[in-house]
Image (cartoon, helix red, strand yellow):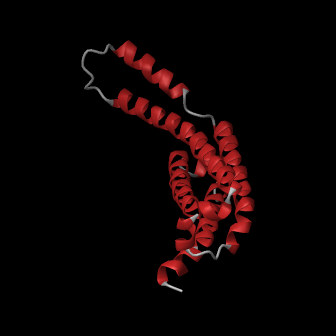
Amino acid sequence: MSEANRAYVHIPTVYRQLIVEAIEDLNSKTLPERDPSETVWSLRKRIKKMRSLLRLMKGNIGKNFTVSDSLARRTAKRAGVLRDRYVLATTAKKLEQSASLEGLPQEQLEALCDKLEKEIPQTTEAEVAIKGATKRLQKLLKLSKPLTKITTEPEQQLER
């Protein structure tokens, strides 16, 4: 078996490890002890890698590919909405601290900052979103169990 083929056989293991790491990361700390935007960024980065590995295994997993890819994509999208709100809030704070805004009256600036700060997810809302992501990742983990049996060589996949 060539070196490339041996690496191909290990893709499901790496895929499952990424899921396990994401779940552990989400469960590792309570929200006040972590930076939610960093947590979401890390989750989305792992999901991007997971989806890449899924595409490599597409020929071997059939229907599971569509279900798994859709679940991973939804998880990243929902986490992205949460991260966007944190970025808005951070932007609002930076705007408020910046005195170099030309042409924008202080009242309008304060109103804009207040509006953006209202977008910050409440702790309970963020925890619910993280728990939802954890549940979806656990479903992905269950769906990935049959993947550990992949032994087909990549050349055979290209012929399909």
Seen at 75% across and 61% down, the residue is: 142
Left/right of residue 82 with respect to residue 107 in the rendered view: right
Residue 30 visible somewhere in the drawing: no
Could you say which is closer to the camera, residue 158 or residue 53?
158
| Residue 11 picture quarter | bottom right
Residue most toward the front?
A: 159
Q: Position of residue 113 (x, y in %)?
A: 44, 23
Could you say which is closer to the camera, residue 52 or residue 110?
52
Seen at 66% across and 59% down, the residue is: 23
Left/right of residue 113 with respect to residue 62 in the rendered view: left
Residue 156 visible somewhere in the drawing: yes
Q: In this picture, is 40 found above or below 61?
A: above
Q: Quadrant of the N terminus?
A: bottom right
Q: In this picture, is 90 found above or below 116?
A: below
How many labels sit on residues? 0
Q: Position of residue 16 (x, y in %)?
A: 64, 66
Q: Quadrant of the C terminus?
A: bottom right
Could you say which is closer to the camera, residue 73 or residue 9?
9
Seen at 55% across and 74% down, the residue is: 8
Q: In this picture, is 74 found above or below 5?
A: above
Q: Position of residue 73 (x, y in %)?
A: 59, 46
| Residue 100 picture quarter | top left
Seen at 35% across and 16% down, the residue is: 106
Q: Position of residue 102 (x, y in %)?
A: 24, 19
Q: In this picture, is 115 found above or below 146?
A: above
Could you say which is closer to the camera, residue 70 or residue 130?
70
Residue most toward the bottom?
A: 1
